[in-house]
Image (cartoon, rainbow, N blue to C red):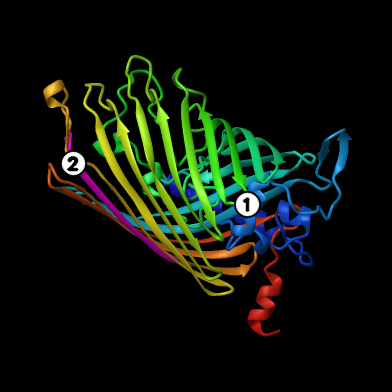
Amino acid sequence: MGRLAVEGRRAATAVVAVVLVLAPRATHAIPVFARVYDKPCSACHTVYPQLNPEGERFRDRGLHGFTPAIAPIRVAPGLDVPGTLPLALSASVGDEIGKTDVPGRDDETREQINTFLGLLAGGELGPHLAFLVDYALLYTDGRTGKTEAGTRPGMAMVQAHAALGSWLTNLRAGAFELPLGASPRVHRLFARGYSIYGTSAFSLLGVRPPVDGRRKDTLSLASTQIGGELSALDDSTGATAALGVVAGSNNRKDNNSSKDVYLRLGRRFGFHNAGFFAYYSPDILGHGAHDGAARFGPDLTLYTRRFRLVAQALAGHDASPTAHGEPLWHWGGFLEGNLRLTPALIALLRVDHVGTPTFDDRAAGGTTRVRRRIWEVTGGAQYLLAENLKVVVEASYGNNYEAVARSTVESWSVTVRLATAFWPLTPPDLLPWLERWRGE
């Protein structure tokens, strides 16, 4: 057994021990907001962590709107702190089997243990302020299979809220997700991420960013960004707007001097909503190389009690991804559906696509000529053992076709995971579920 596999299995054992071995046998587990407001998880979630319309409404009100069941503690005029420990833990552990078939290589089927242990914190800080923090204490790097310790929060923000007539307004600062058609990570129901949010011009071209001696990561819409955002919802018409300025550094210290701006305009129609997102960066590289970038496109969400349909389309433009002055357009999106078969069982299906026209910078002194088309299909199911404890089964197939070289890379993976979120002092209790299953 390899060293990485051993480390993964040891980490998995640690997570399982935290979640199960220390679990009190006579308590019911609820995450931080459910505990503060004495609400079930289903009050704000379809299936944790995906928000339902009431959960989105709670977010629109600046993480306010319910009356706390546990009274807050006044520390100064207009400033309170939660009256209970404002923390929750999220954890998952499971096995993943997959294979990537690259032409000319004899690739083996891989297997790895995926583990995650995160710390969630949040709550009201009085009638107009709130905070939210999401920190990964332990996670498995999907590229290497190695279990890593988190070095920075995935999300950390302070938010101010005010009702101005029919408008609900929010001002937030820190590290937060961009207002896309679907949550890229924090409230994403699928285990697998969205291709269009995580793609970049460099991954599509198969080249590294042309920046010497500097960080090689570049803008990813899937990552939280550091900056500030002003948003508003007109309660009378359902109109929404969000305007933000961010570093575009993917939750890290900014690697160039430019600042990025984005805008999202939308409209709510009952439980349904539609919107348009636009993002612009004057330069996502810096340090001697310049690549201005734009991302824009519409989104649509249709929601009923049993079914949710989400669609996102995005186009992208990079001015000079190889530093030879040749621009690249790319486009894509996804269509996903979630169907609740029973109160405890939900089925998932999603199709992702990303593509480019032919890119050729050889006339400008480069060496890159690419035309790419990527398709992914992901399906599965999630079964609730309890409101905040679920089994996830998911399978994915991908086809990456590069037309210039006429090369196709196929991949598939299957994962089975146990996932939960709970207040640290009352982890999820499996005993009542086991007793019901045995008919006791």
Q: Residues within 10 Å of mark 1 (few under 14, many from 20)?
A: few
Residue of label 2: 371
Which image quadrant for residue 413? bottom left
Magenta: predominant secondary structure element?
Answer: strand
Up the image or down, 278 lies above or below 190; here it is above
Residue in the picture at 57% in, 44% down: 138
Secondary structure type for disc 2: loop
Secondary structure type for disc 1: loop
Q: Is residue 373 magenta?
A: yes
- Could you tell me residue 165's position as x and y percent? 70, 43
- Could you tell me residue 42's position as x and y percent? 65, 64
Camera-side residue: 111 or 266?
266
Residue 249 seen in the current view:
no
Q: Is residue 243 left or right of residue 318?
A: right
> Could you say which disc has been placed on residue 159 in the image?
none
Instruction: Give the magenta range.
Output: 369-380
Residue in the picture at 48% in, 47% down: 184
Residue in the picture at 55% in, 52% down: 187
> Could you say which disc has been placed on residue 236 in the image?
1
Question: Which quadrant: the C terminus?
Answer: bottom right
Camera-side residue: 158 or 100?
158
- Could you tell me residue 424's position as x and y percent? 73, 51
Residue 286 seen in the current view:
yes
Q: Is residue 170 left or right of residue 391?
A: right
Q: Amino acid at mark 1?
A: Ser
Q: Amino acid at mark 2?
A: Arg
Q: Earlier in the sequence, mark 2 or mark 1?
A: 1
Mark 2 in CB contact with mark 1 (< 8 angstroms): no
Residue in the picture at 63% in, 35% down: 172
Q: Residues within 10 Å of mark 2 (few under 14, many from 20)?
A: some
